[in-house]
Amino acid sequence: MINFDKVSKTYFDKSHALEDVSLVVEPGEFVSIVGHSGAGKSTLLKLIIAEEKPTQGSVFFDSVDVNNLRKKYIPELRRRIGSVFQDFKLLPKKTAFENIAFTMEASGRSDEDIATDVPHVLDLVGLEDKYWHFPFELSGGERQRVAIARALVNQPDLLIADEPTGNLDPLTTHEIMEVFKKINDIGTTVILTTHNKGVIDKLGKRVITLEKGRVVRDDKEGRYVI
């Protein structure tokens, strides 16, 4: 599904975010990208969604060279990828239901689809009793669940999550990771970035470790060695 072929990314200040990265993520995998701050984790995700372009090498989504896509085709690519971030990015004046419905409206989905699919994804993430709550009425973990539901509602092939539990307490972190596992179990590929060793140890899924922009370890057994 995802193929990084000798990818390097250098920014204008000459800092090297990624250097000669090659990796493949197969459909249905759950992969954690780990490493200290500045290791290149977020840059790697930005390359997948064509938010950044590599300085060298190629990034493929299925057989499509992401970074050679014409600008008008990038929204189509991004509809196949759900994104979750540490800071939630919810609209504060819209309820949980409305935040998700807004995403569907922007994608041209019908009112009938919205009425059916929004409750489904909110139920999936365990918010069946929070449809009409505003973000300020929800806990941090509940807001993150809304963000996950929003990322899922257009049925993406891939879900990427950039430090999604960075601001959450250990119990809420565990609950959010259980949601990601459930999503992966129904067939969605998941790529997660984190620096939380406890999260990785409990997952038991493939772990790719970045260090100063390079892949230094790719462990299929789910071990994160600091």
Image (cartoon, helix red, strand yellow):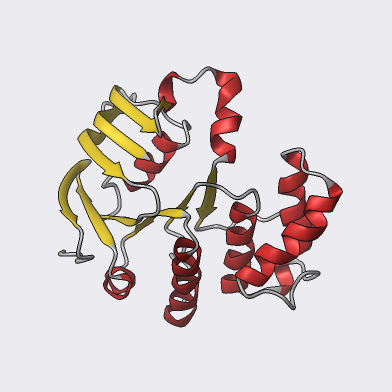
Query: What residue occupies the far bottom of the structure in this picture?
Result: 171
Q: Nearer the viewer, residue 150 or 121?
A: 121
- Whether residue 161 is situated above or below residue 177 in the rendered picture: above
Q: Is residue 215 left or right of residue 115?
A: left
- Whether residue 64 is situated above or below residue 174 in the rendered picture: above
| Residue 8 at x, y percent in the picture | 25, 29
Q: Quadrant of the rendered structure where residue 138 is?
A: bottom right
Q: Nearer the viewer, residue 31 or 56?
A: 31
Q: Is residue 74 visible?
A: yes
| Residue 91 at x, y percent in the picture | 72, 54
Q: How many marks?
A: 0
* Quarter the C terminus occupies: bottom left
Query: What residue occupies the far right of the structure in this picture?
Result: 111
Q: Nearer the viewer, residue 86 or 199?
A: 199
* Quarter the N terminus occupies: top left
Q: In this view, does 134 lie to the left or right of 217?
A: right
Q: Is residue 26 left or right of residue 108?
A: left
Q: Is residue 92 visible?
A: no
- Whether residue 41 is situated above or below residue 107 in the rendered picture: below
Residue drawn where x is 79% and y is 53% of the image: 114
| Residue 82 at x, y percent in the picture | 54, 48
| Residue 100 at x, y percent in the picture | 72, 55
